[in-house]
Amino acid sequence: MPGVECHLQSPMTAEDVLGHGFAHVAVATGSTWRRDGVGGWHRRPIGLHPDLETLTPDDLLAGAMPTGECVVVFDDDHF
């Protein structure tokens, strides 16, 4: 996304964050992505075949790549 900066594993104080002049700040504190489709809108797991390869953003950031030729991106954030 344009205009987005990620500071992974960077200890920062509130003053450090304010010093960057960001209009919006998101703080992640150890949460993990679910693999079953449950999110802000979908409150129950979606029916996924057990053999289906399911990758989370954490997997992709760690270097995992999808093995198939077709990829579906499921986004429950509504952005």
Image (tube, helix red, strand yellow):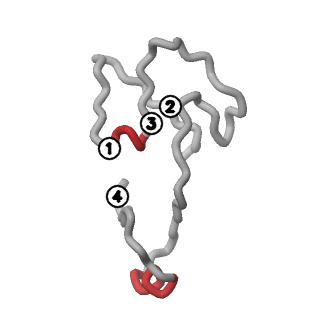
Above/below status of 37 relative to 21: above
Residue marked by disc 2: 74
Amino acid type for the residue under numbered disc 4: Pro
- Residue 79 percent coordinates (x, y): 54, 47
**Which residue was labeled with disc 3?**
56
> Residue 8's image quarter?
bottom left
Is residue 52 rendered to the left or right of residue 47? left
Expressed as whole percent of the image width and height from the top left, the position of residue 63 reads: 27, 40
User: Label for residue 79?
Assistant: none
Q: CA distance from mark 3 to mark 2?
A: 10 Å
Callout 4: SS: loop
Name the N-terminal-most of marks 3 and 4. 4
Sequence-first disc among 4 and 2? 4
Tell me the distance, in whole angstroms, between the alpha carbons under discs 3 and 4.
Answer: 21 Å
Give the residue at mark 1.
Answer: 62
User: From the viewer's perspective, is the residue at label 3 or at label 2 nearer?
Assistant: 3
